[in-house]
Image (cartoon, rainbow, N blue to C red):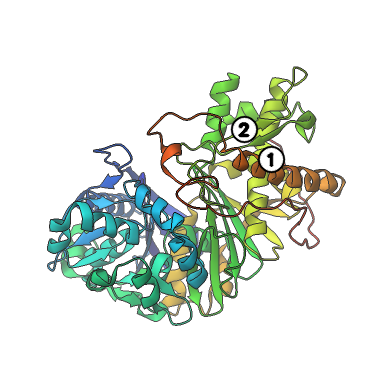
Amino acid sequence: MTVLTVDVGTSVIKSVVFDTEGREVAVSRIGTEVLRPHPGWAEQDMDAVWRGVAATVRGALAQLGPGHDAVRLIAFTAQGDGCWPVDGDGRPTGPAILWSDGRAGDLLAGWQADGVLAEAYRRNGSLTCAGMPNAVLTWLAEHDPARLERSHTALTAAGWLFLRLTGVTAIDASDASAPFLDHATGAYDPAIVDLFGLAWARRLLPRVLGPDECVAELTHRAADELGLPTGLPVVMAPYDIAATARGAGVVDPGQACAILGTTLCTEVVRRCVDTSGEPCGITIAFGRHDRLLRALPTLSGTEVLDWACRTLAVESPAALGDLAAASEPGAAGLGFLPYLSPAGERAPFLDGRARGTFWGLSLDHTRADLARAVFEGLSLVVRDCLRSSGTEVYELRMCGGGAGSDRWCQLIADATGVPTARGTDTELGAKGAFLTGLVLTGAERSMAEAAAKYVCMGASWAPDPDRAALYDELSAAHLAWRDAARSLGWSPSRESGSPSSRGPGPSSSRGPGPSPARPSADTPAQRPHDPRPETSHV
C-alpha cells in the first residue's frame, strides 16, 4: 500500500510517500516560522501551518510521476503539547502557543513549590512543563480571558491537522497523556484536572480517541486543497516523539531510543506506569493497554556541541569529534555537566536553575580533553535518563542528527552499557506514522510485526567490556557532581530577573525542589550483541 505521511514539526513540515515495501519514494519539506512577540514566548500561525502541510503534500505528490501507485492512505504525526484553540466553527482564535513557550514559567514554579507538580506526577507519571495545556490555559485565564471565551476546544498540533483533514475535533491519547490522562481508563483524570484548578476548562478539552477511533475520511474540501481523492482514510498517529520511537522499531518493553537532537530525548517502552523516584519526564500512551512510552526529553542536546565548537574554535561537530578522539576515555579526569540551557533542565530532573560545569579542570588538560568531556557528559545524561526510566533496557536505537556520528554511538554504548544501533530510514517520525497507519487500517496485524517487516537496521555497536568499570565510576561521579552543584545553587551569582533566578531550586525560599539524585553505578542490563565495524566519523 502506498502511504502519504505528514510530520508537522516545530521548525519543518515534511510530507513523505512510502511505497509498498516501506521505502521513502518522495520527500517534500518546508520551513515554518516560530513567532516570538515577547521574550520567552513561542507561537505559530495555525493557518500558516495548514498551508505548509498542503504545500508539502502537493510537492511530494508531484515527485511521484506517472505510473506510480496511487496513494491509498494518509497518516500523520505532529509536535506535541502546546495549546491550539479553535472556536465552534473550527477556526483559530489566535496563534498556537507551542510546547516550547515559557510564559507560564512562574505558574510552573509555584506549582513546583506547592507540591502540585509532584502530586500530579504520582498519578500518571508525567511532569508538567510550561508549554503544556494546563499551564497555558491557566495563563490565558489570567492574561487573556477573552480568547478563552471565544474558544470552543483547546487542540494540539495533531488535533488541528486532524480537524482540517477530516472535520473531526479530537485528541490522540499520546497527546492527552501529559498532563491529564488516566492511563488505566484512557480518559482524562478528573483529580488531575481539579488539582491544577482547571475544572472550569473541562469544556475546552477535546475528546480522547481510542486507537481504533483514530481513523477518519478525508473531506471534500481538504481533498481539493491537497490534490487527493475525497474519502481517503486519514490516520492520526501518536505525536512526534512517540512516532519516532515506532519509526525506529522501538515497540516492545526493554527497547529504547535516544533522539540526539536539540533535545536528548531518551525513550523507553514499558508495560506500566512507574511513579517511583524523583519526578521527571513524561509517560505517553503507546497504543495498547500494556505498552507505555517513558520519555525523558532534556533541554540541552546537540546545541551543547555547537557551543563547544564555538568555545574551542573548531568548525563543526564532526571536527569536535575528531578533536575528542585525541583524548583517552575519561578525558584525563575531566568531567562535564552539560546543563547549558538558560531555562535549566527538565530531565531526568526538573530545576530551572541548573547550569553546566567542568569538574577537575587543571593546567594539564588540553582542548582534546575538553572536547572529550563534553561528549562524555552528554552520553552520561543518556545513561542517567535510562536509569531514571526504571526499566531494564537491552537495546538502544539512535535517532536524530547526532546519531550520524559512529564515534558518539559507540561512546553511548560504552557509557550506558547497552548495545546501540542505527536504522537506515531518515524520516523516522514519518516512518512511525506509516507503521501506525498500516496497523490501524488492518494492513498489518500488530505494531511489532509491522516494525519487523519495514524497519531496516544498519550499523550497530556493542559496549566495550574493558571500559565498563570506568564509566560506572564516571557515572557515579557525574551524579555526585550534580548533587554538589545543586547544593551550591548551581552558580555563585545570577543577574536579577534572569531565567535562573525565577524558578525555585533546592535551596529556594519558595519551597523545596526535587530531591537530588544519589550517586549510583547502576547499569541497565545487557544482552549479547555483535558489533559491526564502521568507519568512525562525527
Residue type beneath disc 2? Thr
Residue type beneath disc 1? Trp
Query: Is the N terminus in the top left, top right, bottom left or bottom right quadrant?
Result: bottom left
Tag 1 secondary structure: helix
Q: Please state if 91 lies on the left or on the right of 267 as rendered.
A: left
Residue 448 location, x and y as percent?
58, 73
The relative height of residue 369 versus residue 142 in the rendered view (above or below) is: above
Residue 27 location, x and y as percent?
40, 50
| Residue appearing at x 45%, y 61% in the figure | 117
* Residue 464's disc number: none
> Distance of mark 2 from mark 1, alpha carbons?
9 Å
Along the line of sight, the residue nearer the viewer: 132 or 284? 132
Q: Please state if 254 lies on the left or on the right of 241 as rendered.
A: right
Along the line of sight, the residue nearer the viewer: 529 or 512? 512
| Residue appearing at x 62%, y 26% in the figure | 319
Residue with the most extreme front position: 509
Q: Earlier in the sequence, mark 2 or mark 1?
A: 2
Is residue 390 visible from the viewing direction of this image? yes
Q: State which quadrant residue 139 falls in.
A: bottom left
Residue 496 location, x and y as percent?
40, 31
* Residue 481's disc number: 1
Along the line of sight, the residue nearer the viewer: 190 or 7? 190
* Residue 357's disc number: 2
Q: State which quadrant residue 172 falls in.
A: bottom left
- Graded by Cα atoms within 10 Å as few (under 14), some (14 to 19) or many (20 or more), the crowding at tag 2 reads some
Residue with the most extreme right position: 466
Q: Please state if 103 lies on the left or on the right of 427 as rendered.
A: left
Residue 177 location, x and y as percent?
43, 68
Whether residues under marks 2 and 1 lie with C-beta atoms below 8 angstroms apart, the answer is yes
Tag 2 secondary structure: strand
Is residue 450 visible from the viewing direction of this image? no
Q: Please state if 448 lies on the left or on the right of 221 as rendered.
A: right
